[in-house]
């Protein structure tokens, strides 16, 4: 039987979409890592009735209820009074909390105002959890078999409390299994085609292992999840299944877990001590941005020429005027000359080029919006590929950049 | 009485924190904009019991239940069968959905697999909502006084459905108050300084008007919200307040609503029939990406040289070897020569250059990570500015690009 948790986020500003709730995701990851199964996340406003109803709802459904937000000193912060009301207790000045608060203010050389002092008033049935970097202490309640934990909404204060105080306490109080995930990253095949190809494999997965499809732009991630007592055993079991998976779709698998196509391309170039440059038209710098988002990319990436005019294509990339006149800027020939031009100019092992119609304007009957040519120049020749994408400018830019990196990756793998 | 909504996100990958749920926040904002009050957000896993229980929970508490996720063609996607079970109906092949799917696959030149075809099977009591860019149709249920809406989890598919189909249908079905928001976009001033400066103005706001601070990277948005019967009256009242606001912080206001610093810079260049180019080192293409993300940017943007090596800085941008030797690549002098070099080479009215240490590596005692020089070359001279940013590579890249655009915008405004 899993130890289950609900995560309750309290705050109008999150509910109305004015700020992003990054806490709930981070907490989910921390719980997942210690084998606590988050079964539900709830976000509610600073409304007494909502808070009380949600506490009851979660108490009935989870072993652990983690609450963030609504602990500020101002009147619109209702979490503390609502918790006291929910448990039918008063709030009193907590000497331990006051001592902690006084020390904190001394450290920051601030004067302790009456309104700050209010933050040391806690429900009488809670255990104070020291917040080393903020004025709102955390609270730990253990009533009717459920643990309630209240934390401030400020991310770095919440994270400090979770890491230093709450996770250790949870590990002590609950007997937790080990949960192991591994994400297999594929590119160049759609979700339904992938599902078709690997059906014999996924049907034969042991019942102890669950599979999830996580599609995103131009790629599909497969997540394998299993749990038990021994991490090494779990890892081995998952890796065995992944070896079998490779027999079906190995050529589409570019990486695992937090790998990205740009990080994998970077690793391959680094390992072979090779370099790359780019020439971008329709991707307008996004391809270079993906490459340079990787720390250390300056070790293998030399730069790019972004040519938004035919003049620049000719002068900086050496595309022939005749090529542009005969085939147009969006053509296989132009893409190839761009890639070869930038490769020569920057003196890199490889070069990637993109040229196309990102949209919304600029399309014709012959060359509609979403038509993109990508080319890869290598020491042994240049290849190009045509993409037929959608109508949305940003999606076309992102999809073209990712496809160009995938095109390079496939070439590197085939020739290594 | 408000029309209320619950937003249910279905998916293990979100519950376990493997991907961030950006959908719920976006949906909250859309609902807020049309006067629907989101009262709760729930995130649950791909678990039949959880889905059924949550549908009931939300039906009892909201007029509208918006559901995202779990609509993929694979077996771990349970939303559709659970909705059918919840309403006690079967799923059948929906001819309309099949026709739509067939047309979509024809457009993308893909073959329709049996698994894809399954996506056209819908609960018999739902109305199909056409998904223009994906294979999973949306579904609209209206049972027992509550509207249930099921959407795919892929953000751009969900957004298309919301904007084109769902929001219009909601406006038709519910009597919604007219809510009028206007967002004032400021750049170059922090939230607390802004709040200080405008306190007399914000204290004097009429009670019918609410103000929200929406800080994001390098900018702070101020959102004014008011509601009533007559849109023109509301707009006038808000614009009057904004005129007063300008007396306090006018020089920091670069735009309104969906404006971005890159779109505003683009409008200014277009109106003056002027052009711009860029030379990027530490921003690695992100600056060009921001500029080219604007439709029609090819009208004023000619391109960029991304120089990740000193050699390229010299050969393509004409930075002097002596400058690099004397001051280094991350210096005011180098930034200025980069901007002037690319301006001359691309023959543009203006040019922006960036050079700095994005990190995590490459920092020194004298030039720590986060040190960035930006320069703007104009027909009347070149100015540079030093930024001292944080330790995070991506944040430094994004902040530098935005600051460079803000630097150009300030110059354009002062000299127009």
Image (cartoon, coloured by chain):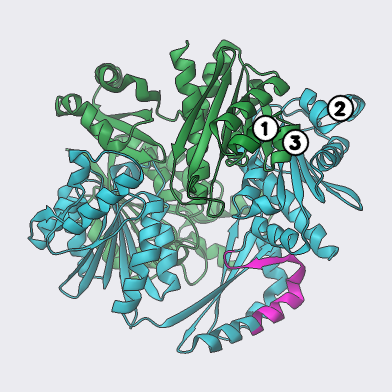
Chain colours: A green, B cyan
**Residue B400 percent location from the top left of the image:** 70, 45
Instruction: Mark yes or no: residue A282 visible.
Output: yes
Q: Chain of mark 1?
A: A
What is the magenta range? Answer: B240-258
Mark 2 and mark 3 lie on one chain; the one further toward the N terminus is: 2
- Which label sits on residue B356? 3
Which residue position is annotated with label 1?
A: A322
Q: Is residue A372 left or right of residue A195?
A: right
A1 over B236 or under it: above or below:
above
Binning the other alpha carbons within 10 Å of mark 2 as few (below 14), some (14 to 19) or many (20 upward) gives: some
**Residue B12 percent location from the top left of the image:** 29, 43
Most common secondary structure along the magenta stretch: helix
Q: Nearer the viewer, residue A8 or A330?
A: A330
The number of numbered discs placed on residues in the rendered structure image is 3
Quadrant of the image containing the N terminus of chain B: bottom left
Q: Nearer the viewer, residue A80 or A191?
A: A191
Q: Is residue A382 magenta?
A: no
A247 over B396 or under it: above or below:
above
């Amino acid at each position: 039987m899993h130890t289950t948790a609900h995560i309750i986020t309290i705050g109008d500003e999150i509910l109305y979409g004015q700020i992003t709730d990054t806490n709930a995701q981070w907490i989910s990851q921390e719980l997942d890592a210690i084998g606590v199964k988050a079964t539900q996340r709830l976000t509610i406003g600073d409304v007494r009735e909502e808070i009380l109803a949600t506490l009851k709802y979660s108490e009935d459904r989870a072993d652990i209820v983690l609450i963030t937000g609504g602990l500020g000193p101002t009147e619109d912060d209702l979490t503390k009074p609502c918790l006291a009301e929910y448990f039918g207790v008063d709030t009193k000045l907590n000497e331990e909390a006051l001592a902690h608060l006084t020390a904190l203010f001394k450290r920051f050389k601030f004067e302790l105002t009456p309104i700050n002092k209010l933050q040391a008033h806690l429900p009488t049935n809670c255990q104070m959890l020291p917040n080393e970097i903020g004025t709102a202490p955390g609270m730990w309640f253990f009533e009717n078999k459920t643990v309630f934990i209240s934390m401030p909404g400020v991310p770095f204060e919440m994270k400090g409390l979770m890491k230093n105080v709450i996770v250790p306490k949870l590990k002590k109080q609950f007997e937790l299994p080990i949960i192991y995930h591994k994400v297999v990253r594929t590119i160049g095949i759609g979700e339904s085609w992938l599902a078709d190809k690997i059906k014999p494999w996924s049907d034969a997965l042991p019942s102890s292992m669950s599979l999830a499809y996580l599609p995103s732009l131009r790629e599909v991630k497969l997540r394998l999840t299993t749990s038990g007592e021994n991490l090494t055993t779990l890892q081995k079991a998952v890796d065995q299944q992944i070896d079998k998976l490779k027999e079906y779709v190995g050529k589409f698998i570019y990486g695992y877990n937090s790998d990205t196509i740009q990080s994998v391309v970077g690793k391959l170039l680094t390992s072979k001590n090779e370099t790359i440059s780019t020439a971008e038209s329709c991707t307008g710098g996004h391809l270079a941005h993906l490459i340079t988002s990787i720390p250390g990319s300056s070790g293998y990436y030399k730069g790019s020429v972004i040519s938004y005019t035919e003049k620049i294509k000719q002068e900086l990339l050496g595309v022939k005027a005749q090529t542009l006149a005969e085939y147009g800027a969006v053509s296989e020939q132009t893409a190839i000359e761009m890639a070869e031009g930038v490769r020569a100019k920057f003196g890199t092992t490889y070069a990637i080029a993109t040229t196309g119609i990102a949209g919304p304007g600029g399309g014709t009957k012959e060359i509609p919006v979403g038509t993109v040519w990508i080319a890869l120049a290598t020491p042994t020749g240049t290849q190009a590929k045509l993409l037929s994408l959608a109508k949305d400018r940003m999606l076309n830019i992102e999809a073209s950049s990712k496809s160009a990196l995938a095109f390079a990756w496939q070439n590197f793998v085939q020739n290594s």
